[in-house]
Amino acid sequence: MLVGRPNCSTQVQGNGSHEGRKAKGGRVRTSLVRVGIAVGATALAASMLTGVISMTQAGASGESGLTASAPGITKTTIKIGIVSDLTGSNASTFGTTADAMVARFKEINAAGGVDGRQITWAIADTGSTPTGAETAVKDLVENQGVFAIAELSSSFSPAAPYLQQAGIPVTGIPLDGPEWFEQPNTNMFSTLGNGTPTGGPVYSDGGFYKALGSKKISYVEANASAAITEGNGVYLSIKRDGLQACDKTIVPIGGVNFTAFALSFKADGCDTAVSANVLSSSLAMATALHQAGLTKTKIVFEAGPSQQIFQNAQDEAAANGAYFLGGELSSATYSNAASIAFLKGLKKYDPSYTGGLPDLGQADGWPVANLMVEGLMVAGKNPTRHSFITNLRKVTNWTDSGLSAGPINFVHFGQDPPQQCFTYVQFVNNKYVPFPKSGKAFCGTIIPGSGS
């Protein structure tokens, strides 16, 4: 589903998993892929030169015994491909993803890199299309010579077969389809851990909708398989809780015309609207409901929370009173120590982040890069693609240095965990506050008989 789940950290911390292993020393089109050894986006050529010099110097004083062990690996560098929807219909949500991933890599480099190697990168844009995603990854692998792919795209599915056949490690979030959990795609690692492909079990909502006081719920989903599957699960869950399902609406990805939906919602007497869409679509849905006179409707955004809400008064008004899924976070309001450290690192290394809550692209981009770093660390001193995939599949308790609500397991590929926990915030008087006030997570268990 098109949901933001921020999980991140500023340094590699020991927590019982391979996260404890030490990191040593402590928007472009696909046709314009840029090498990510730069620091300043506004002075690209000069900063690329600076990046080359600093990484060469770091490598010269790095560990002995390092070899060019795989494509994209030299004695001094590791080259990662970054793929996201930087232009097109999904750019409103994912346009900042690449900068956040780069920020995490810069932070690792500042601490000495991974086993003495500096991380470099190349960035490719899907253009928010499936064809663009496939073209992007092929360019990164075949022309840019990357070792692995860090992705965040709702159009990524067509690229999966190529990457699996080539044995390329991938870290990302399953926003696009079930391929993340289907054999033979064991090379793909979600920051959310394992899951089941379409037809898997459904989790209860942990009492969230009852806590809202909802009685008749309408689910509005983007025309993407992950969002549609999630919608089916939500309806099964609310029926189990004795609540009533209202109309179920599928809209084009990035769509902003919700006038007909609002009229239908009003006619059917619905009281809660849940949007599994990119932020621009969710805001347009809320605006349409308000314009239809439904000012007391409970609205839930599964994309967010986001600083983008504060761009203008119209967006703030549309979001006022809405609930935002914080994801599998230990703190949806970014108020605990791990969250504060993440924001500090993002502000230092991402020039597009100016403070406040990170947007969805930033909040999800950082952990995707962070998981890539975890895979590199467990892959060995001279990593290969095979050692990355094999060893990351052995990790059972990755916690993203304290930001995940619980330990994440990569061992049981294609299997769902027994419980999922989510946090929520509400946008009230132009600020995000925990819901409930205690900040307690809503934990759902698998609904018996809901599996395929």
Image (cartoon, helix red, strand yellow):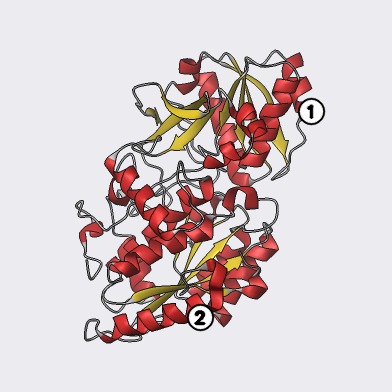
Q: Amino acid at mark 1?
A: Thr
Residue 88 is situated, as x and y percent measured from the top left of the image, at 70, 55
Point out the image quarter for the N terminus: top right
Residue 96 position by quadrant = bottom right
Q: Nearer the observer, disc 2 or disc 1?
A: 1
Residue 452 is situated, as x and y percent measured from the top left of the image, at 52, 39
Q: Which residue is mark 1?
A: 259
Is residue 447 in view from this perspective? no
Residue at horizontal 41 percent and vertical 52 percent from the top:
191
Residue 51 is situated, as x and y percent measured from the top left of the image, at 43, 77
Is residue 100 in view from this perspective? yes
Q: Amino acid at mark 2?
A: Gly
* Up/down of 71 relative to 352, above or below: below
Q: How many marks?
A: 2
Residue at horizontal 27 percent and vertical 71 percent from the top:
112
**Residue 132 - label:** none
Residue at horizontal 52 percent and vertical 60 percent from the top:
98
Residue at horizontal 34 percent and vertical 26 percent from the top:
440
Residue 184 is situated, as x and y percent measured from the top left of the image, at 48, 62
* Up/down of 424 relative to 363, above or below: above
Q: Badges 2 and 1: C-beta atoms under 8 Å apart?
A: no
**Residue 145 - label:** 2
- Helix or strand or loop: what does disc 2 sit on? loop
Asked whether 358 or 323 is in front, the reply is 358
Spatial separation of the CA atoms under disc 2 and disc 1:
47 Å
Q: Assess disc 1: are there few (<14), some (14-19) or many (≥20) residues with their C-alpha within 10 Å of its C-alpha.
A: some
- Helix or strand or loop: what does disc 1 sit on? helix
Asked whether 29 or 243 is in front, the reply is 29
* Image side of residue 275 versus residue 441, left or right: right
Q: Assess disc 2: are there few (<14), some (14-19) or many (≥20) residues with their C-alpha within 10 Å of its C-alpha.
A: some
